[in-house]
Amino acid sequence: MNEPQTKFPSVKMYGINVSKMNMKETVQYLTEAVQHKETHQVITANPIMFMAALNDASFAKAMQSAELVVPDGTGLVWAADYVGHPVKERVPGFDLMFDLLKVANEKSWKVYLLGTTAEAIQESATKLKKQYPNIDFVKARDGFFTEKEDMDVVEDIRKLSPDLLFIARSVETQEPWIYKYKRELNIPVMMGVGGTFDIIAGKLKRAPKWMQKLRLEWFYRLLQQPSRYKRMLDLPKFVFRVRRDKDIIIEKK
């Protein structure tokens, strides 16, 4: 699969195009993608995902081939600024999903929810249907299916033909799965949303505003899920790599 040509300002770090668009521009860009039926894999990237890409060629390929990578993690915003190619602002995946749902509600789009546990995804669907009554939520399905079941899931999504597909699976699975099947799915916007459905369902809480402003969402998540501590070790590793590679990290656009 060829690397996509960007139609927006971006900075290429470690071979991955990171959008410089702000939230409003990103939503407008993806709105037009839906209207023109243009397939887009949207990755809401953070330093942990970049470290995964640096250590795993297949994961790197999934990120390099994505039509849109936005700077979700504050570490990416810092990195772009550090190497002299700042992005306009952080584009949190949680907020991006809800901004897209607002547009979907205005335009009566179809949305498919995929991922997390059966209980959490159904609770999320129930809440979202109340909040966005004009959206046709075509299906809500849990993310616990095997590789042998992949094509059944893909065919189900294709049959229902949503405008937006939001997927919440593990970091190791989520982006590679979308990359593997995005041509078969042929959905205008396919976006990994991580723990978003668990937050909507009430299983997790999002960091309070003051912690978001201080860029401490990662720490709040760690307090709720201490088992993530090994993954969080990638944050200082990313800072070290960027400082070390400052002169070679960037490919100018």
Image (spheres, rainbow, N blue to C red):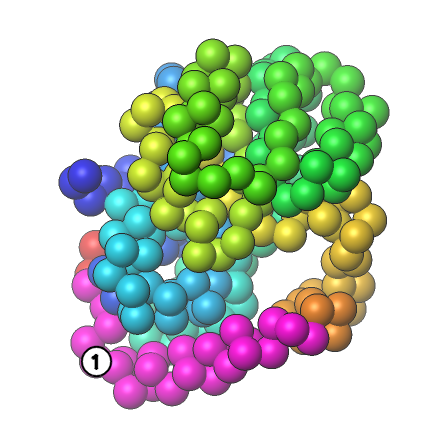
User: Which corner quadrant of the image does residue 136 belong to?
Assistant: top right
Going 43% across and 19% down the picture, which residue do you hit? 155
Going 79% across and 52% down the picture, which residue do you hit? 203
Position of 233 with respect to 199 (left or right) is: left
User: 186 above or below 17?
Assistant: above
User: 103 above or below 136?
Assistant: below
Q: Is residue 203 visible?
A: yes
Position of 193 with respect to 12 (left or right) is: right
Assign the magenta stretch its main secondary structure: helix
Mark 1 crowdedness (10 Å alpha carbons): few <14, some 14-19, many ≥20: few
Estimate the x, y position of residue 161 in percent, counting from the top left. Answer: 48, 15
Where are the magenta residues, as a range? Answer: 226-251
Q: Secondary structure at mark 1?
A: loop
Position of 154 with respect to 166 (left or right) is: left
The quarter of the picture where the N terminus appears is: top left
The quarter of the picture where the C terminus appears is: bottom left
Estimate the x, y position of residue 62 in percent, counting from the top left. Answer: 31, 49
Position of 88 with respect to 18 (left or right) is: right
